[in-house]
Image: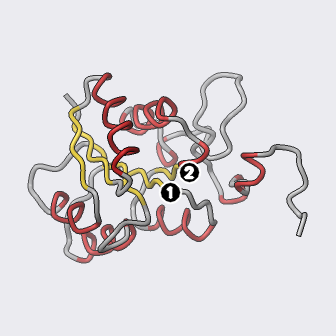
Amino acid sequence: MKKILVVEDEQMLAKIIGMKLGEEDFEVEHAYDGQQAFDALSKADLPDLVLMDVLLPKMSGFDVLERLQKDGKKLPKVIMFSNFAQKADVEKAHSLGALDYIVKAAFSPAEILSKIKQVLSGAASGDSDSGTGTSSGEDANPYETFSSMDEVKPMSEVLRPGESNNDY
C-alpha cells in the first residue's frame, strides 16, 4: 500500500483529500503546518508521495523542501499544491524537486487523485516524453504537467476561458 503525506493547513480540505485517497487504498498521513511536514519528512520511513501546500503556518512548503535539501535528506515524490499560479512559484517548486504543481482552484479532489496516480506511476513532467500529462485526445487541463513555463496559463484563463484578462 502506497503512503501519501498530505500537508495542508485547511483541515477540511485535507480530510476531503485524505478520504478520497483512502477510498483508493492509499495510506494517508497528515501534517497541518510546515514544521510537522519537516518532522515527518526527516524520518527514515518516508511516504511514497507528498502533496504539499505552499502557504503553511510556521514554515512554507518551499522552506520545508529547502531545509530538507540543505540537511541532505532524501525527498520522496513531491507535488506542490497552492491557490497561486505565479510562474516564479511553479519554477521554484520544480527547482526544489517537486515533480508537479497543482493549482487548488483548478482541480477537484478526483482530479488531484488522478494527478497523484500519474506521478506515482512515473508519468509526471520529467518522466513523460509528451510533456502534456495526457494520453488521450481530450483537452488537457492547463495546469497539468507541462514541458515549459510558456504552457502555464493565468488563473483567469482557467476560470473564465476566452474572456478578456485585461479589464483593469
- Quadrant where the image shows the C terminus: bottom right
Q: Is residue 15 above or below residue 59?
A: above
Query: Is residue 136 positioned above or below 59 on the image?
Result: above
Query: Would you name the residue on which mark 2 appears?
Result: 103
Residue 41 place in picture, x, y as percent: 19, 59
* Quadrant of image for the N terminus: top left
Residue 161, picture quadrant = top right
Q: Helix, strand or loop at disc 2? A: strand
Left of 107 or right of it: where is 65?
left
Nearer-N-terminus badge (1/2): 1
The residue tagged 1 is 82
Closest to the observer: 105 or 66? 105
Q: Identity of the amino acid at label 1?
A: Ser
Percent from the top left, x then y, of residue 52?
Answer: 37, 55
**Is disc 1 in contact with disc 2, using a CB cutoff of under 8 Å?**
yes
Say which element carries label 1.
Answer: strand
Viewer-nearest residue: 39 or 99: 39
Amino acid type indicated by mark 2 = Val
Q: Residue at x 52, y 46 (%)?
A: 125
Q: Is residue 83 left or right of residue 58?
A: right
Render colour scheme: secondary structure
Gap in angstroms between the C-alphas marked 1 and 2: 5 Å
